Structure formats: C-alpha cells, structure tokens
C-alpha cells in the first residue's frame, strides 16, 4: 500500500482544543436569572411571573426549534473539523442557557397556572395544562437522559489529547437526533399554549 | 493504537436512567395535575417504586463494571449533583411555597430526590464510559 493510499484511508484525527466545558463567566448571569425567578414567585408579582414565563419560553422554544430543524440538519452536512469548531464554541454556552431558560419557564409557568386557576380539575382548560405537563415530561426525559449527557460527553472527548472520531460521531449524532425530537415537541407546546391563551 | 472505547460492552445505564426519568416525570405530572387538591397516591407510589428500582439497578450494574473511569465519573457526578441540587431546591421551594403538604409533599420530595440523583448519574456515566480508567485528569 502506497503512502498516498494510507493518507486517504487514515481516519481524520480531530485536533485537541482548549476550552471551558462550563463557561464560568456566565454563572453570575445564571444566578441572577434564578434569583429573579425566586423573587417573582416569592413576591407573587404577576408581571414578573409572566415576564419569566414568556421570555424563558420564547428563548427555550426558539433554541430547540433552531437546533432541531436548522442547526442540526446543517451540522449533519458539515465536515467533521467544521462540526468540531462549531461544537466547542456553541455547546458550552448551551450548558448554561438551556437549563436556565427551562427552569425559568417551568417555575414561572406553574405559578401562573396555579394563580389563574388552570390547575383546578374543574377548569375547562385543565386538560390542556395536563397535556403541557406531558409534553414537558417527554422533553425532560429525552433532554436529560440523552441530549445533555451527549453534549457534555462530546466536550470532554474534544478536550482529550487524542479525541476519538468515532466517539464524537456517535455522540453528535445522538445530540442532533434528540434535538430534533425536542424540536417536534416544541411544536406541540405551541399548539397547547395558543389553545390556553385563546 | 489502543481499542476504541465505543466497542466496550457496558450495562444499559442510559436506558435504565431514561426509564427512571419517565417514571419520575409521570409521577410528578400525575401529582401536579391535581394540585392544590390531593391526588390519589397509589399510582404515584407505584411510579416512585419503579423509578427507585430502576435507579438502584443502574447503580448496582455500574458498580460491577471493571476498568470503569470512576475518577471521571465522580468528578462529573459531583458537579452535576451540585447543579441539580440548586434546580431541585427551587422546585421544592415552589412546592412548599404553594403549601403542598402531607403525603403529596412526601411523594413529590422523594420523586425530586430521585430526579436530582438520576440526572448527574446519566451525565457522569455518558462521560466516563468514553474515558480510560488510567487516563490523566484533564
């Protein structure tokens, strides 16, 4: 076998990159947001709860839809080195942004539903509220069992002196497919939330 | 070149964890759907027991694995636990703030405890399974 053939057959070895898995600089902002949610709940401020629910929900759904239907399919068609460049810059930020927006949306939303009487089993909208709980339950299961661990594991792999391209491929495929599932579930969330609001 | 860690056979911790997560979510949804009234607790207790059994099975199966990168597992589990104690604490605070009490509070707190332990387990397992146990910490 010639040198040129060996070079073609050899698997691409991703280069090791230096980056923070959890961007520490973003933690104070996360703490500020969470304190804001606690204050809104404790003081029972309707505007604060609505703000947290709407802003958090808008950010969460937009990110999930973009990841599932735009960024995911685009990434799948990109060469591995380009995926790695994108991943090392993008995924650490997601580790802070997604759990924060999810906590903000759900905590404030639950309080709003409670104050609005939507949790009352006699309320005509109660079935839609329970449906939203079920959608969140599916998203939580997919995101926390598959998506988030894959996100963290791929970042650890990329920090190794010699990252394994097969591990990266498997984890990124898992990340992109589960992002697609949560994107579909967000469409269901839109249907439920618009039904509740109308 | 050493063998890829992709080919290593490990217990189905992710699948068990996902099933436990589904049981936890089911229990919380069932209970929360009745708040502020009390839900019949039998179904929630069953879901709690299923989730606990699945989590216990994950830990027991994982404990029997030879050559697992426990140093990395402990590191990720520790940080994950710290993060999810904060998130779980906020949820528990909301339950207490809403005057949830009695059997319902016990059930929700136990489900929340399983949730707080399950998420870091899934994160730490997924990271450590692709790590060699003799590797130098990065």
Image (tube, coloured by chain):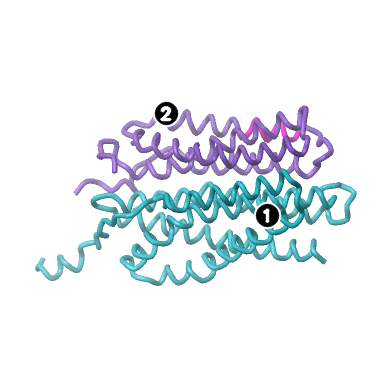
Position in image of residue A32 (x %, y %): 56, 50
Chain shown cyan: that is A
Foreground mark, 2 or 1, reads 1
Residue lying at 42% horizontally and 52% vertically, measured from the top left: A23
Residue A108 is labelled as none
Identify the residue under disc 1: A135
In this rendering, position of residue A186 left or right of residue B121: right
Identify the residue under disc 2: B63
- The boundaries of the magenta stretch are B43-51
Instruction: Identify the colour of chain B in the image.
Output: purple
Relative to A104, does residue A68 appear above or below in the rendering?
Answer: below
Position in image of residue A97 (x %, y %): 52, 56
Q: Mark 2 lies on which chain?
A: B
Q: Characterize the local packing of mark 2: few (<14), some (14-19) or many (20 or more) Cα atoms within 10 angstroms.
A: few
Taking depth in this image into account, of A75 and B17 the one nearest to the observer is A75
In this rendering, position of residue A45 left or right of residue B61: right
Position in image of residue A59 (x %, y %): 59, 62
Residue lying at 52% horizontally and 57% vertically, measured from the top left: A178
Relative to B110, does residue A6 appear above or below in the rendering?
Answer: below
């Amino acid at each position: 076998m010639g040198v040129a053939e060996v070079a073609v057959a050899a698997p691409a070895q991703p280069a090791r990159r230096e980056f923070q898995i959890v961007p520490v600089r973003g933690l104070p902002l996360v703490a500020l947001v969470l304190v804001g949610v606690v204050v809104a709940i404790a003081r029972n401020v309707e505007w604060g709860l609505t703000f947290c629910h709407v802003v958090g929900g808008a950010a969460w759904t937009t990110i999930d839809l973009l990841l599932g239907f735009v960024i995911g399919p685009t990434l799948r068609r990109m060469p591995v080195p380009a995926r790695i460049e994108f991943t090392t810059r993008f995924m650490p930020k997601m580790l802070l942004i997604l759990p924060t927006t999810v906590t903000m949306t759900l905590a404030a939303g639950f309080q709003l539903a409670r104050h609005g009487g939507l949790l009352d089993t006699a309320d005509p909208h109660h079935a839609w509220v329970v449906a939203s709980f079920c959608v969140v339950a599916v998203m939580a299961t997919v995101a926390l069992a598959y998506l988030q661990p894959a996100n963290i594991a791929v970042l650890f792999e990329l920090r190794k002196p010699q990252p394994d391209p097969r591990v990266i491929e498997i984890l990124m495929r898992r990340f992109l497919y589960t992002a697609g599932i949560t994107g579909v579930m967000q469409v269901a969330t839109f249907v439920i939330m618009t039904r509740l609001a109308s | 070149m050493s063998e890829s860690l992709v080919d290593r056979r490990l217990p189905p911790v992710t699948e068990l964890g996902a099933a436990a997560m589904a049981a936890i979510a089911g229990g919380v949804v069932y209970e929360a759907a009745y708040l502020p009234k009390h839900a019949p607790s039998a179904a929630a207790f069953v879901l709690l027991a299923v989730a606990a059994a699945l989590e216990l099975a994950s830990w027991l199966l994982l404990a029997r694995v030879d050559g697992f990168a426990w140093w990395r597992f402990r590191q990720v589990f520790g940080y994950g636990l710290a993060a999810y104690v904060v998130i779980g604490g906020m949820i528990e605070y909301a339950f207490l703030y809403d005057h949830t009490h009695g059997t319902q509070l016990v059930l929700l707190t136990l489900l929340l405890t399983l949730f707080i332990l399950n998420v870091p387990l899934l994160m730490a397992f997924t990271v450590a399974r692709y790590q060699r146990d003799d590797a130098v910490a990065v």
